[in-house]
Amino acid sequence: MYGTVAIVGRPNVGKSTLFNRLVGKRMSIVDDTPGVTRDRIYSKAEWLGREFTLIDTGGIEPDTKDVILSQMRIQAQLAIDKADVIILVTDITSGVTSTDADVADMLQKSGKPIVLCVNKCDSIGELPADFYEFYNLGLGEPIAVSSVHGHGTGDLLDAVFSAMPEKSDEPEYPEDAVKVAVIGKPNAGKSSLINKIAGEERMIVSDIAGTTRDSVDTVIKRGDDTYVFIDTAGIRRKSKVNEQIEKYSVLRAYMAIERADVCVIMIDANEGFTEQDSKVAGYAHEQGKASVIAINKWDSIEKDGKTMQEFTKKLEVDFSFMSYAPFVFISALTGQRLDKLFELIKYTSEQNARRISTGTLNDLLAYATARVQPPSDKGKRLKLYYMTQASTKPPTFVIFCNKKDLFHYSYQRYIENRIRESFGLDGTPIKIIVRERGE
């Protein structure tokens, strides 16, 4: 890795379009609405065989009193602090604005190398006279770019690497890092949890539901273990997904689940289980992800000696379709039981990746079929020949039999329960594939 590059600028100058162009895929949400990118988005990018980390940021409004915009400014400042080189994006169609000048002044105070990008220079040929106005920002030679068409991006990256310090000391997270997607409906406290764990204002946190629109990675080291927390946009009911931006966010949350090893499903203790929670959890279950159900805001609940027990009983009914998932009652605000949450994340991740030998599985199969006879139909009895583990994440078992039609769902469930009884596999779904001999 050659270093970290942050893309900054005022709202709606095309930062996210440039980010997507340089990364080579649609990662940042792009929309004509100013302020769509609220948090920092990270991705790897490459130029002439050199890999670097690219950060997209929300637009900077230096003097704003708006709660979201002012926090976007804090997020941008955090990105600037982490960056080796900063790309300041401006817009040729609006010329140099007072905000551009304020942002340029703020960046110069950081002492970091700055590359000035004049975006939306979409026509090829002679540059318009307005282009030369950007020299007034005092950041050296501006580079004309069209992030929509890709013109000038090569010159931009050449300038970035010319300004890049020798090598970034920031280590990448190791391959064996546990990737954790924090999912749930809006305002359940997902960003607050990650901020508490990380010990910095890593996410924008406000009581406006749906503040996090993009999923963002936070690397946490605990002892010898590394965790990558992916904060996601809250998943709403489809009937409530009116805004086009919101649709991208739901898709991003689903993509985060696919990337993750473990899903932490956040439930708001004040609201309890909702239909939307079941949909979020159901998607994690379908994807075969290890899961932990975290009941947040537990500090705000009035309790007596039986409150947790009664709450757990109700949740066991609500989450009956994923009875393997453990519960933990936490407070992202106070940090209550976060150690327990980490224990469960690590344990369920190990269970999701667990491998069991074929010999041990067949001993179990012989015991299970002797204990409860396989079903029969019209004089034909199901015969189970042998079982083997085909893959992990989730643990997937293939059972060979004489006739698939006889292997009813209820008997498959019985075999799954015996597997769990013998080997644990807590916190992870189990997949069983039935094959007739010869298939």
Image (cartoon, rainbow, N blue to C red):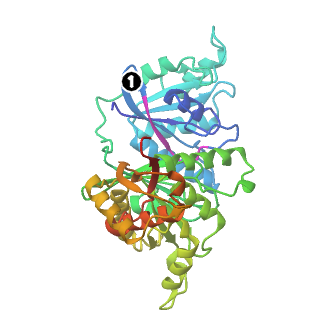
Q: Amino acid at mark 1?
A: Phe
Please, which residue is most extreme toward the top here? 125
Classify 243 as above or below 158: below
Please, which residue is most extreme toward the front here? 379
Q: Is residue 41 magenta?
A: yes
Residue 430 falls in image quadrant: bottom left
Disc 1 target residue: 161
Please, which residue is most extreme toward the bottom here? 305
Residue 370 falls in image quadrant: bottom left
Please state the extent of the stretch shown in magenta in the rendering. 37-45
User: At which x and y percent is residue 435?
Assistant: 45, 47
Q: Nearer the viewer, residue 240 or 62?
A: 240
Q: Is residue 26 magenta?
A: no
* Quarter of the picture holding the N terminus: top left
Classify 244 as above or below 326: above
User: At which x and y percent is residue 233?
Assistant: 58, 53
User: At which x and y percent is residue 53?
Assistant: 41, 35
Q: Is residue 270 visible?
A: yes
Q: Residues within 10 Å of mark 1 (few under 14, many from 20)?
A: some
Q: Is residue 141 visible?
A: no
Q: Nearer the viewer, residue 292 or 130?
A: 292
Q: Is residue 66 left or right of residue 435?
A: right
Q: Residue at x 40, y 38 (%)?
A: 83
Q: Secondary structure at mark 1?
A: helix
* Quarter of the picture holding the C terminus: top left
Q: Nearer the viewer, residue 284 or 76?
A: 284
Q: Residue at x 40, y 31 (%)?
A: 113
Q: Is residue 341 left or right of residue 7?
A: left
